[in-house]
Image (cartoon, rainbow, N blue to C red):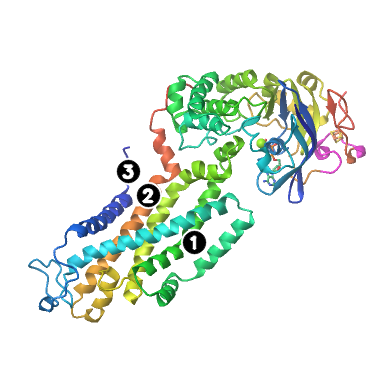
Amino acid sequence: MKGRVNVALLVGAVLVALVGLAAVVSFFWTPHDPTLVDAARKLREPGGGYLLGADKFGRDTFSQLMVGARTTLYVGIVAVGIAAVLGVPLGMVAGMTPRGWLSELIMRVNDLVFAFPALLLAVMLGAVYGAGTLTAMIAIGVATVPAFARVTRAATLQVMVTDYILAARAAGRRRPAIAVRHVLPNISSMLIVQASVSFAIAILAEAALSFLGFGTRPPTPSWGRMLQESQELLFSTPRLALWPGLAIALAVLGFNLLGDGLRDYLDPRLRRIREQAEPPANGATR
Amino acid sequence: MLSVDGLTVRADSAELVHQVSFAIAPGERVGLIGESGSGKSLTALSLMGLLPEGVTASGTARLGERDLVGVPESRIKDLRGRELSMVFQEPMTALNPLMRIGAQVAEVMTLHGRSSPEARARALDLLGRVRLPDPEQIFRAYPHQLSGGQRQRVMLAIALANEPRLLICDEPTTALDVTVQKQMLELIAEVAPALLFITHDLAVVASVCERVLVMYGGRVVESGPIREVFTRPRHRYTEGLLAASKLTPRGTRLPTIQGNVPPAGHFPDGCVFRNRCPQATTACEQVPALTGDGHAHACWHPAD
Ligand SMILES: Nc1ncnc2c1ncn2[C@@H]1O[C@H](COP(=O)(O)OP(=O)(O)OP(=O)(O)O)[C@@H](O)[C@H]1O
Ligand code: SF4
Ligand SMILES: [Mg+2]
């Protein structure tokens, strides 16, 4: 396909790929041990093998950022995974039986969860089950379920009124089969977009929770906690807050742009225009 | 074979189709005509059990020994696509855009118990039978690679896949251009086992069907053999429809009769055509019954 380059998609993909690359490489290699505390290197200035310097415990900032990317993606994937696994089927049920009591129930419970602040949920879960990455992921995931369920329901409603669903029913297909064969594939582009936007929100939420001390526990590096630890040095050594802050901002921007770009790219109306550029199957009647 | 008796369709408070009765014998091709909003589609959808949410049907409709109306959906699902099939108006949207044509044709057969190699072989056959050029290529194509006429042929192949006893077509050619339309009609007339054919277009119904039901305001106002109804219409609505069609070129969607079709639920009581009928009298404030064997009409002051 030739044509207008989708800038949002491109920039978003590059940013997300950078985060991904940092995370993957961190499994095999980091410039230094990101958790190694060394008083001799305390607040070391950038340079000489320490690209971005070291923090108040003497840990290498660049290495911490790399492993922090891993934490970020990990939390994002699990949280969005939870949200999708719960939200998509619920949204589909609600969308396929829009007048049923089950649909009513799902959407009301959904509103309830949606009205509940995600961070408060995480703090409560943390207080009961102990703070940590897992608690944070579950809390963020559960809090994201309503968003997924709503988008899924709206997309399902759209698909359900199309003639090919009517035709599938006319052909004798049963509801669960219609859901899997016809509805799911046709709403998947919307879900992909929703996933990338939710991913951005999850990253922010994890950073906020870690900043508040309800997220990732030390010594596991996390961007949010790096911010928190740099707090008292904000004026004397601003770079310690700058780098993780920038990492969070770029990752969030990356996923948001990716979501926007995918929305444009997968938009059925735009897709149809592109398809018309392709030749038809054969030259018969048109 | 199909017998419909007192079919009534309701949405909340409004009655959309009122006491419709007709029968279709094996091999018979019956047309259902009427202006937009007269209840044609709802009549067809209630036979398929595919009425939209919130719309319900009562009365009886039987295909052979099986009840179609007033039974839970689970009891008629096995009939759909097997004994009873339907082709819809919009060929551009009636196929799943993400599935190959062959898979969609084969699916309706595996669904009703055929093995998948057998279904695939037969799907290829069917694509040839509906006269698609190069069936093998079409088999592997996606819907967007086909023209409207080709897609409608695919829909017909799907509808015929399980050798149904009755085919329902809801304006299957309205979205096609005139030459393609003609070929499609010939094909339908040739392959349909028994046919209920819905259209606005009087010329179309005359070329495909043997018998016709004229619907207005959710009621059958006249019915009979095509030739009789078209040459000697009795109901004033049919008369107006025919007169209007002589003035409008073939293929245009709506022949015009003075006045507009009222919205559902706002038809006059008594004869539903009363507010537009030039012959209306006070007698027409009573509901006229559909009377006459063969050629029946529901009008107090029928034409000649
Ligand atoms: N889901 C629904 N709820 C309420 N009213 C409906 C619904 N579907 C259709 N109607 C009404 O029922 C009447 C008959 O509709 P129907 O679709 O059967 O008409 P039709 O004869 O097929 O018209 P057309 O030629 O435009 O397809 C219309 O007035 C329509 O507004
Ligand atoms: S019954 Fe009366 S109003 Fe109705 S079509 Fe006949 S003459 Fe016209
Ligand atoms: Mg219709």
- The span from disc 3 to disc 2 (Cα, nearest Å) is 14 Å
Q: Quadrant of the N terminus of chain B?
A: top right
**Marked residue nearer the N-terminal end (1 or 3):** 3
Left or right for B234, reference A246: right
Asked whether B119 or A251 is in front, the reply is B119
Tell me if residue A276 can be seen.
Answer: yes
Magenta highlight: main SS? loop
What is the x, y in percent for residue B150? Answer: 51, 25
What is the x, y in percent for residue A280? Answer: 42, 27
Range shown magenta: B268-283
What is the x, y in percent for residue B81? Answer: 61, 32
Residue in view at x 48 percent, y 57 percent: A87
- The span from disc 1 to disc 2 (Cα, nearest Å) is 21 Å
**Marked residue nearer the N-terminal end (3 or 2):** 3
Subunit under mark 3: A
Same subunit under labels 1 and 3? Answer: yes
| SS type, badge 2 | helix
Q: Amino acid at mark 2?
A: Leu
Q: Amino acid at mark 1?
A: Pro
For disc 3, the marked residue is: A4
Q: Which mark is residue B225?
A: none
**Marked residue nearer the N-terminal end (1 or 2):** 1
For disc 2, the marked residue is: A262
Residue in view at x 39 percent, y 28 percent: A279
For disc 1, the marked residue is: A146
Q: Quadrant of the C terminus of chain B?
A: top right
User: Is B269 within the magenta?
Assistant: yes
Q: How many residues crowd around disc 1 within 10 Å: few (fewer than 14), some, or many (20 or more)?
A: many
